[in-house]
Image (spheres, grey):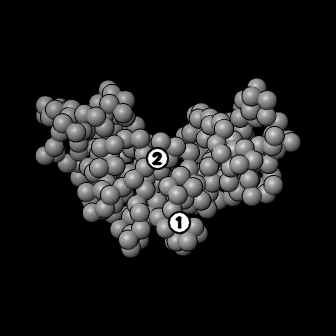
Amino acid sequence: MSFFIGIDIGSTCAKTIVMDEKQQIVKRFLQPTGYSSVETAKNIKEMLAKEGIDVEKEKVVATGYGRVSVPYADKSVTEISCHGKGACILHGKEDLLIIDIGGQDTKIIEVQGGGVTDFLMNDKCSAGTGRFLEVMANTLAVDPADLCVMAKEGGNTTISSLCTVFAESEVISLIGRGESRENIAYAVLDSIASKVASQAGHISPGGKTVVLTGGLCEYEYLKTMLGQKLHATVESKPDGRYAGAIGAASVAWGMK
């Protein structure tokens, strides 16, 4: 049996998807990117070898921030293309507005007929990204998942700054004033949702299905808040954080 491997090395996490000859996902791996994408690529190769998969004998496509650091890849493809293709596969649709919230950037991708027609990327500031959520969760001494749960019980509090450093100072001030963690958690998610919705607003959904991918797609309340601000239902899938790797594996499958 042949395997088709997609490797998405992001700024914070590396995702690996293995497809079989029927384009079905047979294995998925998630690991921190760490300080070196080259070392991460080496670790992925060793991890796959333990599963009986020799990357030198299979088709491999790399994408993401560290795609150029995968020496055994047959091809490297931009994350925009791979996220678009992967989201279409996951949702079974060819017309989508994709919101991908990653560790260090947020991508808004418009797909029509299965192909990318427009995109925007916020890579200058960590506001509205996974890193922003992580910093704020650390300030509140909780993990990101718990912060999102707490936010459902909060309200009536805002964070005005879009800069992570200044926003963290605002959170510390709110803590000092005795504001509840639930209200602060709500303010954090509201800030992320507002930032992302503002960015996504530059590309009209136009009747397309709006989907959330990336590491934050598992947080239901964030998805709800995004939907409220976009005036649309935001969908996600359990494998949404693997969208880029799925798209890359699909490209590898097409090279058979």
Tag 2: amino acid = Lys
Q: Residue at x 42, y 44 (%)?
A: 216
Q: Nearer the viewer, residue 57 or 109?
A: 57
Q: Residue at x 56, y 39 (%)?
A: 13
Residue 37 drawn above or below residue 243: above
Q: Residue at x 19, y 48 (%)?
A: 158
State the image coordinates of residue 60 (x, y, percent, origin top left). Answer: 76, 48
User: For the residue carrying disc 2, how many other residues have a C-alpha within 10 Å: few (<14), some (14-19), or many (20+)?
Assistant: some
Disc 1: which residue: 94
Q: Is residue 161 left or right of residue 59?
A: left
Disc 2: which residue: 237
Report how far apart the C-alphas of labels 1 and 2 lie in the structure.
15 Å
Quarter holding the C terminus is bottom right
Give the numbered dot on residue 120. Answer: none
Mark 1 element type: loop
Mark 2 element type: loop
Q: Nearer the viewer, residue 104 or 64?
A: 64
Q: Nearer the viewer, residue 205 or 151?
A: 205
Q: Residue at x 59, y 59 (%)?
A: 85
State the image coordinates of residue 43 (x, y, percent, origin top left). Answer: 72, 31
Quarter holding the N terminus is top right
State the image coordinates of residue 150 (x, y, percent, origin top left). Answer: 25, 33
